[in-house]
């Protein structure tokens, strides 16, 4: 038999079997917002800065206390990169949200086409990699000889696309009944961080905190420094408008400087909540409010959620005042 | 780059195609050597110099040994090789272990000392290639083998990529002659190679990695799990390590076969063994025969009285345990196997001399001895898997009941156990199965292979766990 015919027979059987196996159950998507769809008025969408730090119950309670009750909900995913965020917005908002007034998009991580290490091979990332998304990636990526990064990203996305098409791991995920297998030693990065932290003295922690704060303060307000998210924020706001929803932009209180040009956002009738600012929000940058990496601590989460509630109430009161 | 990753597939296809297009046997070998160095450098390019230096010195020592007849010179040369190889192994693998152990001992004795361990990265597969390289110089020293004049041949023997990082530990006398004659195209049996690779892939990716993902949390935090979870975890670990390592070996043999080379058999259904001696004749055969030929026999082997033989057995197994890694758990694992070998040896000798020998042929006895061996192997592997002796203690003496729920009982493990059973049955008939499957007509074979590939990919977890033996 002709070798090409053998290859064709092999590949056909591979694809047909993969297609059949694709009919078996797969890991359910962690769409924890599904239950909130009927009542939610303000939806937060973003990476772990939303998933772990925005507390809707606390925001609702605070808005009630401030006399302008709101029902909020969130859709947060670990290291939600730009390429996924837009897709998630489209997917989420294609469902009916009868009471939704506002969508707050966290743009801290920006428009990143790279598959982050912690997300590699996650079911949700595999699910993203259909033909439409892959072509979208290739259309918006410019390949030049200056950098290898786009080529590596293209390989990464293609590999995920192939894995999705061939249903790689769908059975294994099903066997484990969980999204992702644990780390090789079974410990979480959080546990490792806690162990490392406990070894540091109070003075060392204080010194490290001071250093980070000084660095952020210097870079945040220095012209030309910090990652600009203006273009990405405008793209997401445009997407939201096309879906029929009003959007606001959120920047989380991280340690690295993130910038969004307020006048550009105001020009499209939107608002920026920039918490990446230790001068305006010093309570989010105290030592007690800080947690692992760029996240806030349990105490920080409460402060952050209350501050968010205040910003939302201020916005809705102003809007309602203008309406009158 | 591990055998179950897409990167390896790309690498393999590229090397295979270029190798096939080359005409000259010498050029092919040089190309395979370059590819092997690329493969090793892909892990960490900094260690390329290490393997190159180790290879060069053993190559030169081999040539010198061949030229000189002076016994003192010969002894000096082989000592240089042994000191160098064991020195490299000792520094990279055992330096911190020895420093930490000395520090702990001194602290316990009440002597103040500062811990002074270095940040040393363990080069992948160092234990395998140093043992392989050492066996060459010892064989040349013993005049069992003539030294190789071609550096490419010797370097390829040490670094041949299919077996470079986790064996089997190939003997120079088995591999070097294969490099002398061009590999014949008709010797390449693509179907057998594909099937063997698929079997290895199944064991490693579908069984071992799935088990690993479920039991790692149990071993990381044993006191959070109930005794039943820990027992199941221990049994599954024995299945994992076997499938992981023998899966790697199958894939290594298949990969080497694609270039026309034959590697040593490393496993022979070890969990069917009815005593510990038999287990070591079936488990990691290339290491156990290496230890036998280069350590146990030079120590005196079976010669001498019972005490001397016991000493030889214990010492060999202790060093065999230590070969696996710088941890007291490996030492204890080796020691326990050593003790079991000594006990078995004297039990057998006593029984042989008595009239009870006939009872050994009865089925109940055979089943009992098989179960006892399996229990011992699982028990020892549990110590082997735990990160420290304290952790091993916690594993065995942890709470009977616990509120924590292990992923082990979610039902999937039944499937894994069935897969294991199927595998064991297939093992007994493996060669027959491969032969029958390879003889199928094209229109049946290739679609079946495609369907099997899809099922294998479907069951592959995407955490890409490296092979367990890579760390040794």
Image (spheres, rainbow, N blue to C red):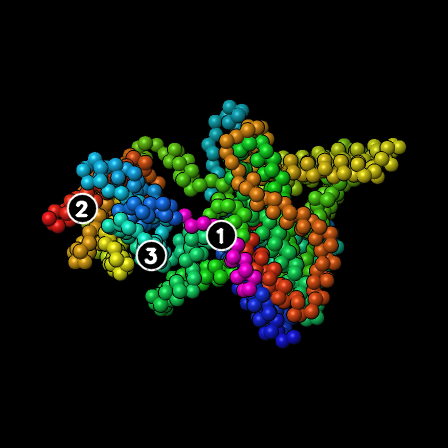
Q: Residue at x 26, y 61 (%)?
A: A242
Task: Tell me which label, 2 or 3, sits earlier in the chain.
Answer: 3
On screen, residue A87 versus residue B87, left or right, reads left
* C-alpha span from label 3 to label 1: 22 Å
Q: Residue at x 51, y 36 (%)?
A: B405
Between B131 and A108, the residue placed more toward the observer is A108
Mark 2 falls within which chain?
Answer: A
Q: Residue at x 56, y 48 (%)?
A: B209
Do we see residue A56 in this rendering? yes
Mark 3 falls within which chain?
Answer: A
Q: In the rendered structure, which segment of residues is drawn in magenta?
A: A15-30
The reply to whether the C-beta atoms of the residues labelled 3 and 1 are less than 8 Å apart is no
**Is label 2 in a helix, a strand or a loop?**
helix
Q: Residue at x 31, y 42 (%)?
A: A53
Q: How far across and down, in percent of the image, does residue A206 sit?
A: 29, 35
**In this figure, which residue is indicated by the disc labeled 1?**
A26
Where is residue A231, by image quadrant?
bottom left
Question: In the picture shown, does residue B332 fall above or below A129?
Answer: above
User: What crowding class fits label 2: few (fewer than 14 Cα within 10 Å), some (14-19), or many (20 or more)?
Assistant: some
Mark 1 falls within which chain?
Answer: A
Task: Tell me which label, 3 or 1, sits earlier in the chain.
Answer: 1
Between B202 and B248, the residue placed more toward the observer is B202
| Residue A16 part of the magenta-drawn span | yes
**In this figure, which residue is indicated by the disc labeled 3?**
A94
Where is residue A17, by image quadrant?
bottom right
State which quarter of the image contains the N terminus of chain A. bottom right
| Total count of labels | 3
Q: How far across and down, in percent of the image, does residue B251 sit?
A: 62, 57
- Labels 2, 3: one chain: yes
On screen, residue A45 versus residue B472, left or right, reads left
On residue A316, which mark appears? 2
């Amino acid at each position: 038999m002709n070798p090409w015919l053998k290859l064709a027979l092999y590949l056909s059987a591979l694809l047909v079997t993969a297609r059949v196996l694709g009919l078996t159950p797969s890991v359910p998507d962690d769409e924890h917002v599904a239950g909130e769809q009927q009542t939610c008025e303000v939806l937060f969408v973003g990476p772990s800065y939303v998933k772990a730090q925005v507390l809707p119950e606390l925001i609702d309670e605070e808005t009630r206390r401030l006399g302008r009750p709101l029902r909020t909900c969130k859709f947060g995913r670990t290291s939600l990169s730009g390429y996924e965020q837009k897709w998630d917005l489209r997917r989420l908002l294609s469902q009916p949200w009868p009471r939704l007034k506002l969508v707050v998009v966290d743009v801290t991580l920006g428009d990143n086409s790279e598959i982050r290490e912690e997300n590699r091979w996650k079911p949700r990332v595999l699910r993203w990699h259909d033909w439409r998304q892959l072509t979208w990636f290739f259309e918006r990526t410019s390949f030049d000889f200056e950098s290898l990064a786009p080529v590596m990203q293209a390989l990464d996305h293609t590999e995920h696309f192939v894995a999705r098409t061939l249903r790689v791991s769908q059975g294994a995920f099903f066997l484990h009944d969980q999204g992702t297998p644990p780390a090789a030693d079974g410990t979480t990065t959080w546990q490792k961080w806690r162990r490392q932290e406990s070894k540091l003295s109070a003075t060392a922690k204080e010194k490290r905190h001071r250093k980070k704060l000084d660095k952020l303060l210097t870079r945040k307000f220095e012209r030309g420094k910090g990652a600009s998210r203006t273009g990405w924020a405008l793209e997401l706001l445009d997407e939201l408008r096309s879906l029929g929803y009003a959007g606001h932009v959120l920047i989380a209180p991280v340690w690295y400087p993130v910038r969004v040009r307020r006048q550009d956002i105001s020009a499209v009738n939107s608002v920026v909540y920039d918490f990446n600012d230790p001068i305006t929000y010093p309570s989010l940058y105290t030592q007690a409010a800080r947690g692992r990496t760029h996240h806030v601590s349990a105490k920080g989460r409460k402060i952050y959620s209350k501050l968010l509630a205040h910003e939302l109430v201020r916005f809705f009161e102003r809007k309602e005042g203008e309406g009158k | 780059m591990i055998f179950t990753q897409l990167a390896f597939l790309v690498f393999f296809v590229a090397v295979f195609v270029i190798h096939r297009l080359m005409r000259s046997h010498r050029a092919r070998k040089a190309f395979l050597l370059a590819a092997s160095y690329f493969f090793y450098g892909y892990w960490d390019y900094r260690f390329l110099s290490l393997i190159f230096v180790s290879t060069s010195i053993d190559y030169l020592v081999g040539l010198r040994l061949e030229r000189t007849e002076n016994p003192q010179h010969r002894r000096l040369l082989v000592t240089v090789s042994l000191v160098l190889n064991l020195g490299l192994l000792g520094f990279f693998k055992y330096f911190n272990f020895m420093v930490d152990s000395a520090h702990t001992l001194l602290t316990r004795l009440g002597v103040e000392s500062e811990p002074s361990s270095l940040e040393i990265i363990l080069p992948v597969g160092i234990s395998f290639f140093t043992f392989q390289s050492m066996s060459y110089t010892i064989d040349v020293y013993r005049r069992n083998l003539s030294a190789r004049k071609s550096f490419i041949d010797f370097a390829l023997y040490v670094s041949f990529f299919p077996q470079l990082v986790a064996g089997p530990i190939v003997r120079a006398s088995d591999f070097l002659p294969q490099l002398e004659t061009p590999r014949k195209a008709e010797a390449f049996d693509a179907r057998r190679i594909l099937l063997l690779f698929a079997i290895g892939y199944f064991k490693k990716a579908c069984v071992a990695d799935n088990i690993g993902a479920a039991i790692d949390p149990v071993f990381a935090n044993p006191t959070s799990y109930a005794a039943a979870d820990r027992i199941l975890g221990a049994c599954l670990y024995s299945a994992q390590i076997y499938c992981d390592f023998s899966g790697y070996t199958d894939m290594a043999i298949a990969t080497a076969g694609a270039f026309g080379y034959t590697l040593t058999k490393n496993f022979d259904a070890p969990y069917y063994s009815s005593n510990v001696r038999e287990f070591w004749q079936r488990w990691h055969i290339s290491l156990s025969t290496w230890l036998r030929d280069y350590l146990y026999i030079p120590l005196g082997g079976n010669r001498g009285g019972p005490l001397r033989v016991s000493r030889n057995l214990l010492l060999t197994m202790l060093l065999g345990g230590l070969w696996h890694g710088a941890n007291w758990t490996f030492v204890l694992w080796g020691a326990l196997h050593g003790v079991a070998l000594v006990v078995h040896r004297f039990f057998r000798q006593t029984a042989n001399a008595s009239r009870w020998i006939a009872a050994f042929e009865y089925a109940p006895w055979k089943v009992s001895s098989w179960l006892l061996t399996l229990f011992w192997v699982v028990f020892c592997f549990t110590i082997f898997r735990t990160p420290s002796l304290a952790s091993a203690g916690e594993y065995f003496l942890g709470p009977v009941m616990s509120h924590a729920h292990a992923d082990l009982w979610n039902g999937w493990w039944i499937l894994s156990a069935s897969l294991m059973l199927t595998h064991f049955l297939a093992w007994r008939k493996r060669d027959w199965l491969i032969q029958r499957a390879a003889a199928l007509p094209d229109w049946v074979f290739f679609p079946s292979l495609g369907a099997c590939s899809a099922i294998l990919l479907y069951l592959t977890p995407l955490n890409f766990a490296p092979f367990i033996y890579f760390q040794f």
